[in-house]
Image (tube, helix red, strand yellow):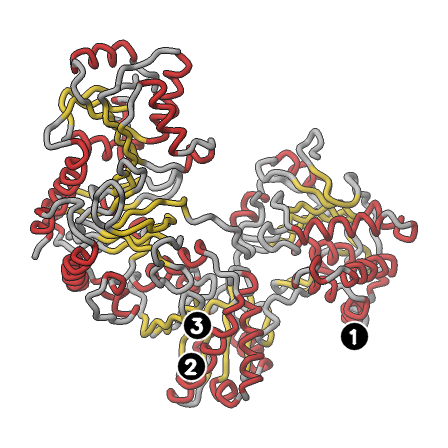
């Protein structure tokens, strides 16, 4: 079996046990491959102890921050197709991910399979809740730009909803919507941008946009909105009020496993697709948490071919809500995120002056 | 409540005086002893380990011991010395009670003290400030009222740092290189002195035979001391050891001692408040170290509480920067003196067990090492002293009248 074969599977049609078997085999082979091809990864795995086993929980956990500190690569220099960078959290160092053509293509096809199952097989007119400037500004490009480019393959007649000044361009959007003539449209953007520059601006202007036939897909995290006490419910409610949109899907993903996203279903649960898996770890000893117990999120996918990022320990917290039995009908694990690992005060005498 | 300059008074006066006392003046010692008693009278639940340690440090017998050290021999009598006047202390944010030690030393040297503490409020810090204010309101301590000023203001408030720096006779800056660099932008008046504490690190030298020979209870005690020296400050203070050097007669003995020791430390570390962020940072640092190309022989993990990285090369200060929250380098020495090669001017403290401390000091002196400012038994890494980082603070904060 290869990742290509895995991509043939329905994105949400594989029962958890079967998935564990398929991913286990692929991921273990991938660990061997990365150990053979990436000396730094091999050195670390060797020192952590050789735990030969086929279970997902036995695959070495690589901390996500490592991609910020060093470039990890499992392909020869001449096969490097591009380097992806992510801004991570504002003000921090960026991750550098090395891609070959194969991995880049897999990323795209993975996203296509996952998102396709939510919006249907055919491309839709696409409204991007951002400013066209986002693709030109090199500082912004990394995270937001890459997300927009990635999702653009699902869209036709792409239209940016915000001006360069981050104001809604209501006239242009209105015209664009008329041309769509009541057909379904895809609306895409980053959670905070949508709330701040689209929802709030619409609310203030008192105007409404007829997006009843829209499907909104948004990502990028809730941290900023949580600071403003905006819950997921409030977010959906607010958007329904200003543009009548009812099909709203959040997603969870990261630059270190681009394309392999976790989509929110109609029941408000995030789902692992057939192409990746999610484990929750207890930080006392990295034991796996049972359903219902909160811990730190680990993401695994056999998609990571060109760099050893097939098993990553994130800095996000979450909890498994159930397996194979979400009322939405999708198989596999579903979960919710519960925030970032809280920053705590660290003792010591190195940053005296702070605070 | 902040005043117009963005300064919040936490204890004492907002306008400290500039009146020198002789070092170890009775009025000062009486006051500090009263503070010690007040701390020790607090119910257990109100006084954590650190506050109790401060109370113990400030008790009269200890203060008199310190005074005694300056009385005899060739050093000038404290009677022939006077404090510099007004000392300005910038205390570390993440060693919550450090400001109190800095204050006590400033007072003992004979100064009026202006102390800047972090805006991060800690329960123990606030408790201490209210005890100080309470004591200062007593008639018997009226003479101390103008001598103590504890304030807090934002680090961005350089105007205030500048104003205080112009006013003081000596400035004491605790904490890392960055703080020292930043505070140095505030110009002192020409006559003022400065004492700074830049980034430092620490190592341990342990004797394998002695560790192997310990009874279970003694071993448990040694591990508890080692735990206090390191985990007590998230292994992040200047004097918390990052690397352990084994002095051993043969490899087998070293191996046995190491195994016993780390198992005991792992058991002691069960009481450590291990948070998710600490594990996340510690595990990331371990990966960085393992993938850095450093010659690592072996990594042992006791859950996520204790990591021990056995190094094949003498582990220098660069590797040490990865060791935090209960993560240690270890190195088995062949000659018994390779630890000296790990020492740089940044190495502050050396803790030891089962080896001869005097011989270690002799090595530092005879080899003229750039680092090592104090050599103390395991368990005393964090013990505060009036001589810190190789600097005699009583002398530096006072002047001699010959």
Nearest to the observer: residue A78 or residue A65: A65
Q: Which callout, 1 or 2, points at the residue further toward the start of the chain?
A: 1
Residue corresponding to mark 3: B341
From the top left corner, tell me how far across and down residue B254 is, in percent.
42, 85
Report the mark closest to the observer, 1 or 2.
2
Write down the chain letter for disc 1. B
Q: Report the residue at 30% width, 68% height from top.
A: A48
Name which quarter of the figure residue A123 lies in.
top left
Name which quarter of the figure residue A73 lies in.
bottom left
In contact (CB < 8 Å): disc 3 and disc 1? no
Nearest to the observer: residue B143 or residue A186: A186
**10 Å crowding of disc 1: few (<14), some (14-19), many (20+):** few
Nearest to the observer: residue B70 or residue A110: A110
**10 Å crowding of disc 2: few (<14), some (14-19), many (20+):** few
Nearest to the observer: residue B143 or residue A323: A323
Q: Which callout, 3 or 1, points at the residue further toward the start of the chain?
A: 1
Q: Quadrant of the N terminus of chain A?
A: bottom left
Name which quarter of the figure residue B305 lies in.
bottom left
**Same chain assignment for discs 1 and 2:** yes
Residue corresponding to mark 2: B259
Name above or below for residue B55 compared with residue A161: below
- CA gap, disc 3 and disc 2: 25 Å
């Amino acid at each position: 079996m290869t990742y290509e074969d895995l991509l043939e599977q329905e994105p949400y049609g594989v029962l958890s046990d079967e998935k564990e078997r398929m991913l286990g085999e692929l991921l273990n082979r991938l660990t061997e491959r990365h150990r053979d091809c990436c000396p730094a990864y091999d050195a670390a795995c060797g020192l952590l102890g050789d735990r030969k086993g086929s279970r997902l929980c036995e695959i070495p956990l690589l901390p996500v921050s490592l991609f910020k500190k060093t470039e990890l690569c499992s392909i020869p220099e001449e096969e490097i197709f591009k380097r992806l960078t992510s801004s991570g959290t504002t003000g921090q160092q960026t991750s550098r991910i090395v891609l070959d053509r194969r991995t880049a293509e897999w990323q795209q096809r993975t996203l296509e399979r996952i998102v396709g199952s939510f919006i249907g097989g055919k491309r839709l007119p696409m409204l991007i809740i951002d400013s066209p400037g986002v693709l030109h500004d090199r500082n912004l490009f990394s995270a937001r730009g890459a997300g927009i480019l990635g999702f653009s393959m699902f869209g036709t007649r792409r239209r940016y909803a915000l001006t360069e000044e981050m104001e809604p361009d209501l006239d242009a959007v209105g015209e664009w919507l008329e041309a769509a003539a009541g057909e379904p449209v895809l609306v895409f953007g980053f959670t905070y941008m949508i709330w701040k520059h689209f929802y709030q601006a619409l609310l203030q202007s008192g105007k409404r946009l007829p997006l009843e036939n829209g499907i909104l897909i948004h990502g990028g995290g809730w941290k900023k909105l949580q600071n403003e006490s905006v819950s997921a419910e409030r977010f959906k409610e607010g958007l329904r009020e200003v543009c009548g949109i009812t099909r709203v899907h959040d997603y969870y993903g990261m630059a270190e496993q681009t394309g392999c996203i976790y989509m929110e279903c109609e029941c408000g649960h995030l789902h692992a697709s057939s192409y990746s898996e999610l484990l929750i770890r207890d930080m006392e000893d990295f034991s796996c948490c049972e359903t219902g117990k909160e811990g730190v999120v680990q993401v695994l996918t056999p998609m990571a071919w060109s760099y050893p990022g097939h098993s990553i320990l994130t800095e996000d917290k979450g909890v498994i809500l159930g397996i194979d039995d979400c009322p939405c009908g999708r198989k596999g694990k579903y979960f919710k995120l519960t925030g970032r690992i809280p920053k705590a005060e660290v003792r010591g005498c190195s940053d005296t002056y702070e605070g | 409540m902040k005043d117009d300059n963005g300064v919040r008074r936490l204890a004492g006066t907002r306008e400290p005086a500039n009146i020198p006392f002789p070092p170890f003046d009775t009025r000062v010692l009486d006051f500090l002893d009263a503070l010690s008693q007040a701390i020790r009278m607090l119910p257990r639940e109100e006084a954590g380990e650190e506050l109790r340690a401060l109370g113990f440090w400030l008790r009269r017998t200890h203060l008199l011991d310190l005074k005694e050290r300056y009385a005899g021999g060739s050093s000038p009598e404290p009677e022939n010395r006077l404090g510099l006047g007004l000392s300005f202390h910038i205390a570390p944010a993440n060693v919550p009670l450090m400001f109190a030690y800095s204050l006590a030393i400033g007072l003992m040297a004979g100064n009026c003290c202006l102390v800047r503490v972090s805006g991060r409020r800690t329960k123990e810090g606030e408790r201490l400030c209210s005890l100080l204010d309470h004591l200062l309101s007593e008639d018997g301590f009226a003479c101390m009222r103008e001598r103590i000023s504890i304030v807090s203001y934002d680090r961005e408030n350089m105007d205030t740092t500048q104003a205080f720096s112009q006013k003081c006779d000596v400035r004491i800056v605790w904490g890392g290189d960055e703080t020292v660099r930043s505070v140095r932008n505030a110009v002192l008046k020409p006559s003022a002195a400065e004492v700074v504490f830049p980034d430092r690190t620490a190592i341990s030298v342990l004797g394998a035979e002695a560790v192997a020979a310990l009874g279970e209870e003694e071993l448990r005690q040694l591990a508890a001391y080692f735990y206090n020296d390191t985990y007590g400050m998230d292994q992040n203070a200047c004097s918390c050891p990052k690397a352990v050097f084994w002095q051993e007669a043969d490899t087998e003995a070293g191996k046995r001692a190491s195994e016993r020791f780390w198992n005991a430390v792992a058991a002691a570390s069960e009481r450590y408040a291990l948070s998710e962020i600490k594990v996340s940072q510690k595990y990331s640092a371990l990966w960085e170290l393992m993938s850095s190309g450093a010659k690592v022989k072996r990594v042992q993990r006791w859950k996520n509480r204790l990591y021990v990285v056995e190094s094949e090369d003498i582990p220098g200060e660069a590797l040490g920067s990865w060791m935090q929250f209960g993560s240690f380098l270890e190195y088995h020495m062949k000659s018994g003196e390779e630890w000296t090669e790990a020492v740089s001017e940044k190495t502050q403290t050396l803790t030891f067990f089962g080896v001869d401390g005097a011989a270690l000091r002799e090595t530092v002196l005879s080899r003229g090492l750039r680092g090592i400012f104090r050599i103390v038994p395991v368990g005393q890494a964090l013990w505060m002293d009036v001589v810190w980082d190789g600097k005699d603070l009583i002398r530096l904060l006072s002047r001699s009248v010959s």
